[in-house]
Image (spheres, grey):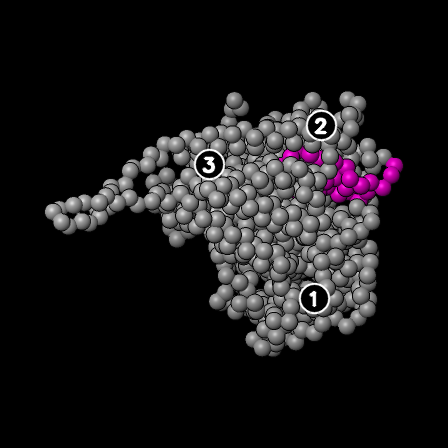
Amino acid sequence: MTSRLKFWLATSGWMAIHCLYFWFYYRLLGLTFAPLSLFFTLLFSLWILVLLVCFRSRLMCGLITAIYTVALSWALFNFGYHQVFRKFLQLPLTRAGSLNLPMLLWLKDFAHLIPWPMAVFSAGLIAALFLYRQTIQTLFAVPKRYILMREGDERYYVESPGHRISRWPAVAVMICAHLLGYLLVTGAIGWYHERIERSLADPAGATADLGIFGYALAATPRQPAAAAGPTTETALPATDRISVEEEPIPSAAPGPIRTELETLHGYLDALAALAPRAPAPPDRPTVSDRPHVIVYQMESVSYWPLDQEPSPMPFLESLMAGQYTVDRYFANGCTTIDAEFVVNCGYLPETFGPVSDLFTENSYHCLPTILKSLGYETYLYHANDIRFWSRDKLAPAWGFDHLLFSPEIPHREPDQNVFDTIVDQLAVAPSPGYHYVIGMTSHSPHNEHFRRFYERQHQLDIRPYNGTLDEETRPRLLDEATLRLYLGFLQATDDGLRHLFVRLEAAGLLERTIVVVLADHRYYDFTADRQLDRFLNYNRLPFVLYVPGGRSAGPLRPVASHVDVAPTLLGLIDGSLVPPGSFLGKSLFDPDHRPFVVNKCLGSVNLYDGRLLIEGDEAFGIYRVTASEGGTAAADGRAMLDPLKRLVARSDRLLRENRLGEDQVIGPAVPAPKEVRTDQVTDSDRDGLSDLRETALKTNKRDPDTDGDGFMDGVEVTHGYDPLGPGRLEAPPVE
């Protein structure tokens, strides 16, 4: 058998094994191995083989094998990810820097969903690539040549100098292969984009059509300008279509200049005009001057466990029955850090990744910063490393001064013990406090190992739920043992919540403390006949607002989300304050509250208003009304598509461009302007100017707003205004 024949047999054999692996991969996921998916799979394997053939040094072969191993590991994590989210994870090259330790640890949570045959097959495929590499090394090895030498009667052999083999043919093959591959990939992706846009097919079908390699290449975030084009499920008459460029958008604030943030509020108002009108809320309760505030963000607590009988969280249910709550409450993202961002900063998360990915250096104007200007001390608690999700950078930027993480709080400390720390601190606090608790008790994984960990390390007895399970509200990915343990972890969470209220009452603090209890994100997917049922079971979260002296007869609002929490708390603490423009939600006590929720999760977008569900894939730019409850809901939903797409694209762009504080210069003034991040040690009044610079400018080092015009001295200097000048800032000229 010739070397050439051996080479082609080895090449075709490895490519066949590679394709067989992904056929098995998609079959286990319940997907078809579509022709386009096969095309991208073959193209990827061919690219790896061309690299191995052209670069045969040990260093390059090791690097190529490492690249393939990383790609295969990414596919394995996506195997688990797809079972939860029903799509593959999007990580375009522009966000490659976001693949940091927190992201990798987050992906690790999906590892338990990978069946062992897939893991074994993956290891075998990597071994097969190694054998293929050894085979071509042998086939293409240059044989040594020897020359017979004679000196008198002596004969001996001398190794002949090897012929220098030119690398240019290999380089030429590489260039041609990459050009051809680029043309094929670009053509296939362009054809698929045109097809999916023309047919307005379900974007979820792209997973099966493209496969993991094609999806990674095709599902690339569009530029915000793409949002200008109309996107509708069917052609709509001009009178039914909302065009935010053709029709005026109401300004969110008085003044002749409409800022980008005001434009966002215009999109939200346009959507609210099409949503069903909600009943008027009760009057906003009056609270004591500067009450303490505790926000408890429970980890991975969905609403469906409360439908079990008996409930694993009876105390939470009793709170919801007697205090302010929301009938259908949702998150605006799907990660813990995005929940913290939205609740504290009132802004929508970025569509394609957690806020910790690319936005740790942004300037923010969030609720903790505003409360500090009112005399509050701000605290953030979590029984984990502060570097996880880059909280060491984000928390101070959001306005938290006191950060209590591991090791100050032992790793995975039960929430009940954290509540003891808070109550002890409140009992002696000379000033009001804003305390934000990121829960840990109910954090995954929910298994026997961590049940024993809590029992051994923290003397917390977690027992599996022993009630009858409601099959109609049972997640599709959970076996019964894991489900009962998960509900047992929720029982421990509920006991901790009860402990908090008991301690507050015993310390005489309950009537001086506002308590917000909410969950961070959805948990475990569902299978349901109706799309709306599946969405609600999967995404609905518990929420309760305890206000001293306040009582609620029924839900406060039919639909609300995390984005409404910051304006609600701001209104309760000081109703005279005007929320900053970056607060995209509204107070739950506001008659003009917008009765819908927008959720942005790793490329997917949902809008729900109680009657209809819109689902979108921002990577493909496709938005569709996927479920509605009759009447005018379907028509209203189609009219919502255009402003929704614009809202998503523009809100992402402002976050990327670090423009959430632009209303601090243009538009209405607020009593607590944006804090500029500087050296706080030499900036006594925290106005963004060091004491040394304030001495030179002759501003007051102890007063953040020397001229009393409603804008911090640092903000005025940053934007070229005189911090000693009288009156309010004038808007800069519009170009």
Nearer-N-terminus badge (3/1): 1
- Pick the residue in front: 121 or 499: 121
Q: Amino acid at mark 3?
A: Glu
SS of the residue under disc 3: helix
Neighbour tally class for label 2: few under 14, some 14-19, many 20 plus, Cα within 10 Å:
few
Residue at the spot of label 1: 482
- Location of residue 720 with respect to 484 vertically, above or below: above
Relative horizontal placement of residue 392, taking residue 455 as reference (left or right): left
Which residue, as the protein is rendered here, is positioned at the far left? 152
Taking the spot 79% from the left edge, 58% from the top edge, the residue there is 473
Q: Position of residue 472 (x, y in %)?
A: 82, 58
Report if the CB atoms under discs 1 and 2 are less than 8 Å apart. no
Tag 2 residue: 198
As shown in the figure, which amino acid type bears the numbered disc 1? Thr
Which numbered disc flags the more N-terminal residue, 1 or 2? 2
44 relative to 58 in the view: left or right = right
* Magenta highlight range: 602-631
User: Number of numbered discs present?
Assistant: 3
Which residue is located at x 58 percent, y 58 percent?
119
Residue denoted by label 3: 716
Say what amino acid the circle numbered 2 marks. Answer: Arg
Asked if the residues shown at circle 3 and circle 2 are in contact, with their CB atoms under 8 angstroms apart, the answer is: no
